[in-house]
Amino acid sequence: MKAKHIALNILGYSTIAVVIFCTLTYFVWRVFPYKTISYLNTPFPVSKKVLQQGDIFTYHVDYCKYSNEIPDVKREFVDGLIFTAAEREAIIHQGCGDVDVAIQVPLTLPPGEYNLRITATYQPNWVRTILRHSQTESFTVLKKTGE
């Protein structure tokens, strides 16, 4: 009877210890200030200020990236309405550097004044998602002329 009582006490205290450990781990993962990336030149400069539907242009990013994690990147053309471009992974290396990122203006994008809104999504652990927002300088999209 005494051995059963001791075993139940050990089981009870062990369960409490595991719950406290898991709660503390969750809390630390949730609030820890993860450093992901810093952008040094926002808004990002664009290679051309006037484009036609279907044109390819680049924007220039100066950055310092603090982790090896590869974020998912969502890009949207914004002029009051939001037009989503294809999502992709951002392959930039840890450390500081600069990169020119190419993107094609969709053929279906209406003419107008736009900027490109970029959202990088990092997931450093299973309970935390970090979003880093940035945008390009404004540019004008014109209707595609015949070739």
Image: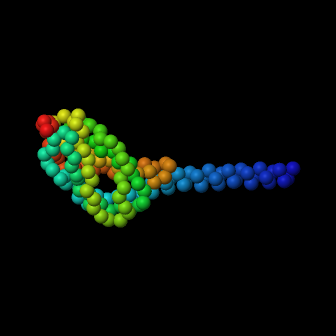
State whether residue 53 is above or below residue 20.
above
Q: Is residue 113 visible?
A: no
Residue at 27 percent across and 61 percent down: it is 98
Residue 28 in view in this figure: yes
Between 102 and 3, which is closer to the camera in this rendering? 102
Residue situated furthest right in the rendering: 1
Residue located 21% across and 41% down the image: 54
Give percent across and percent down for residue 62. 26, 60
Front residue of 94 and 31: 94
Q: Depth check: give the residue in front, 81 or 61.
A: 61
Side of 67 where 77 appears, left or right: left
Total label count? 0
Q: Is residue 37 above or below residue 72?
A: below
Residue 52, given in percent of the width and then of the height, sits at: 16, 41
How far across and how far down the image is residue 34, in percent? 42, 58
Q: Quadrant of residue 31?
A: bottom left
Could you say which is closer to the camera, residue 11 or residue 97?
Answer: 97
Q: Is residue 59 left or right of residue 130?
A: left
Residue 49: percent from the left, percent from the top?
A: 14, 48
* Residue at x 45% of width, y 57% of height: 32
Quarter the C terminus occupies: top left
Q: How is the image coloured?
A: rainbow
Residue drawn at the location 85% of the way across and 53% of the way down: 2
Q: Is residue 143 above or below residue 65?
A: above
